Amino acid sequence: MEQHPCNISTPIREDAALSSESIPVPGQCNASPAPALPSSGLYQLDILLRKGSNLAIRDRGGTSDPYVKLKLGGKEVYRSKTIHKNLNPVWEERVCLIVEHLLEPLYIKVFDYDFGLHDDFMGSAYLYLESLEQNRALDVSLELSDPQHPQQDLGSLELTVTLSPKDKPDSEATQQQSVRLSEQHRKSQLWSGIVSISLIEGRDLMSMDHNGLSDPYVKFRLGHQKYKSKTMPKTLNPQWREQFDLNLYEEEGYTLEIAVWDKDTGRRDDFIGRCQVDLSTLSKERTHKLELPLEEEKGMVVLLVTLTASTAVSISDLTPNVLDDPTERQQLSKRYSLLRSFTNLKDVGVVQVKVLRAEGLLAADVTGKSDPFCVVELCNDRLQTHTVYKNLSPEWNKVFTFNVKDIHSVLEVTVYDEDRDRSADFLGKIAIPLLSVSSGEQRAYALKNRELTGPSKGHIFLEIDVIYNAVKASLKTVVPAERKYIEDEQKVSKQLLQQNFSRVKRCIMFLINVGTYINSCFEWESPQRSILAFLFFVLVVLNFEIYMVPLSLLLLLAWNYFLLASGRKNRDGDVEAVEDFLQEEEEELDDKDSEKRGFMDKLYAIQDVCVSVQNALDEVASYGERIKNTFNWTVPFLSWLAITSLCLATLVIYFIPLRYVVLAWGVSKFTRKLRDPYMIDNNELLDFLSRVPSDVQVIQYRELKLEPGQSPSKRKRINPS
C-alpha cells in the first residue's frame, strides 16, 4: 500500500472536512500533483472501510452503536454492519462501486442504531473522487461533521480507497453497473438458519398507566426483520402465548433485540424496557427456555427459542438449476414422497420461481422510463432481483428457491421503480396461491394495483414449480397460520367499513332466504314441495343417526363437485358477481366522498372504535364466505381435505358411540395444559377455514386474462363462461 508524502488536514467544504495522507492539495504541498482524471467515464472505486475514532456519544450509557451508509449520486449503495457499544469501531469491510462521473462526491453518513426508536445522526463527510489518484491504494482520514453544528467534534473515519479506470467495453461495464445484485448482495438475502420463538409471558412489568396497570406488547428485531406481538390489555403479567419464526442471516449478526411497550390510545406509546439475546451462545436443534430481565429491573419476559438449520434457499441466474436436473428433481420428489410424510413435519415442500421478464411497465420517471426491480415474497421470506435501469421491458432471468412451510401460502410478486433518495415507486403486483400453480408452465401474469382489486399497466413472465407432501400439507392446515412480522397499522376507512357491512349483509340475506324457503314449506305455498319436505322430515326424524350430519355435508360437497365436473356450474361465476358488486360499492362511495369531505374528520375522532367494528365485520363476512367457498370447490385441495375429514368423521361416529367420542374430546381438552404447559391454544376448524380464501381474496388472487396479441394497456376481462 502506497503512502502519499503529504500529510495535511484541510477542510474542503463547510459541511464536511477531509483529512488525507494521500490526496494532494494545490498550494500546500511540494509534491507533484497527480494528472487530472477525465470527469466522465467508467471507473471502479474499491473501498476498505477500516475503523472509526472518537465517535460521538448518542446512548445514555456513554457509548453508541455506529454503522455507516455510503451514497453515490443520491442513491444508497452500501450499508455497513452495526458495531454495538463502541466509539472506536473496527469494520474492515470491503465494497466495490462502479462510478460514472467523478464530479459527484461519495457521501458518507454515520448513524447510531436504536432499536424501536429513530436512529441518531452521528456525522457525515464527503470523499471527492476527482482528487484521487488512479491505480493507487490511498489511506484517507475523514473528519465527521454536522452541517447544523459545524463546530462540534464528531470524530473521524479511516478508509483505504483505490480508483481505477474500467478497461471493459462500455456495454459490458454498463451492464455490470445495472446488475446491482452482486455476489455480496445475493448472499446478504439468504438465510442460514431459522429461529423459532414462542413468546410465553411477562412478569412484574412496570406500571405505565394511571390505573396502576399497562397494556403491554413486545417488539422483536433480528437484523432487518421485525415482529410485533398482540397487545394484552390492563395487566402487568401478560400471557401472550404466540409463536413465530425469524430467519437467521450470518452477516447481520446473532443479536435478538426485544423491546416491551405500553399501548396508549390517542398518544404515543410508552416504552417499558428492553433486553437482548445473543443467539450464538445457544445450541442448535434444541429448545431453550429463557427468562430475560428487562433493563433497570422493569420486569421480565419468558421465551422459548429453538435454532434450526435452514434447508435450500437460493438465488441463481437462469442456468440449469436444481429442478431442471432430472436427478436432483427425483431426489426432491423422493424427499417429499408419501413414504416420508412423518419426518420433519415443518418441511412441507419447496417452490422455485423463475422471474424471467416484464413487458409494458408503467413509466414512473420524467424521462418516460423506469428503473424496475422485482421483489418475490412468500409469507415472511423475501428475495429480490437486481435493478434494470431505464427500461420498460426489463429482463431479470433470476431463479428463486423457497422452502414451503404452508402450502396455503400466497406467493406475492411486486415490481417497483428504484428512485434516488426516496422510497421505490410501486409499478404492479400479483398474488398467486401455491395451490393454484401449474408447475413448470411459463405464464404471463397481468399486474394489478396495490390493493389487488384492479389492473395496473404491464405484465410479468414467471415459471413456477411446486413440490410438496400432501400429508404434511394437510396436517399443517389445522395449526395456526404464520403471521406477517409487522403488519401495517389499521386505519379507519369509510369505504372499507361500508364494503364489509355489505358483505355481512349478503351472508345474512342468504340465511334469511334459507329460512324463508323452509317457512314456505310450512305455509304450503307449493303443495308438491311441502309434501316432499314433510316426508323427508318424517324419515329423518324416525331414522336419524349422528353420522348423518357429516354424511349430509359430504353429499353437499359431492353434489357441487358433480356440478363443476359436468360443466353445469362455473367456479368463476360467483367470483365475478362478487367483483361486480364490490366495484359498484366503490363507485357509490366515491360519489359520496366528493360531497362530504368533513365526514372523515369525525371518523378519525373515534378511530379505534371504528377499526374494531370494521375488522369484526370483515372477520364475520370472511368466515361466512370461506364456509361457502369450501363447498363450492374454490380451492380443490381444501375441498378434498374436507371430504377426507368428513369421511373419517362419518366412520368414527358410525362405529364408536357418541358418548365415547365426546368423552375422549373432553379428556383431551382438560389435560392439554397438563401435558404441555406452553402449548399454544388453537381451534382446528377455524385454522382450516383460515386457509380458505374469502370472496375478496379470491378476486385478489385471480389472474387478469389477456386476449392473444392484446396490448396490456387495452386489456379487458374475459368471461370464462
Image (cartoon, grey):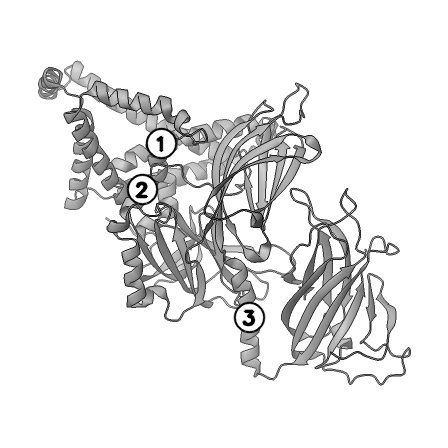
Q: Going from the N terminus, do you reach mark 3 or mark 1 first? A: 3
Mark 2–mark 1 Cα distance, whole angstroms, equals 23 Å
Residue matched to label 3: 178
Picture layout, residue 339 above or below residue 102: above
Please tell me whether mark 2 sits on a helix, a strand or a loop: helix
What amino acid does circle 2 point to?
Val
Name the amino acid type tagged 1: Leu
Q: Secondary structure at mark 3?
A: helix
Disc 2 versus disc 1: nearer the observer: 1
Crowding near the residue tagged with mark 3, few <14, some 14–19, many ≥20 C-alpha atoms within 10 Å: some
Question: Is residue 274 found left or right of 506 in the rendered image?
Answer: right
Mark 3 and mark 2 lie on one chain; the one further toward the N terminus is 3
Distance between the alpha carbons at the discs numbered 3 and 2: 42 Å
- Residue 230 x, y percent position in the rendering: 53, 33
The residue to which callout 1 is attached is: 686
- Mark 1 nearby-residue class (10 Å; few <14, some 14–19, many ≥20): some
Determine if residue 693 is in view.
no
* The N terminus, quarter of image: bottom right
User: What residue sits right under mark 2 in the picture?
Assistant: 575
Direction from residue 184 to residue 266 in the image, left or right: right
Query: Quick one: label 2 or label 1, which is nearer the N terminus?
Result: 2
> Residue at the location (63% across, 71% down)?
96
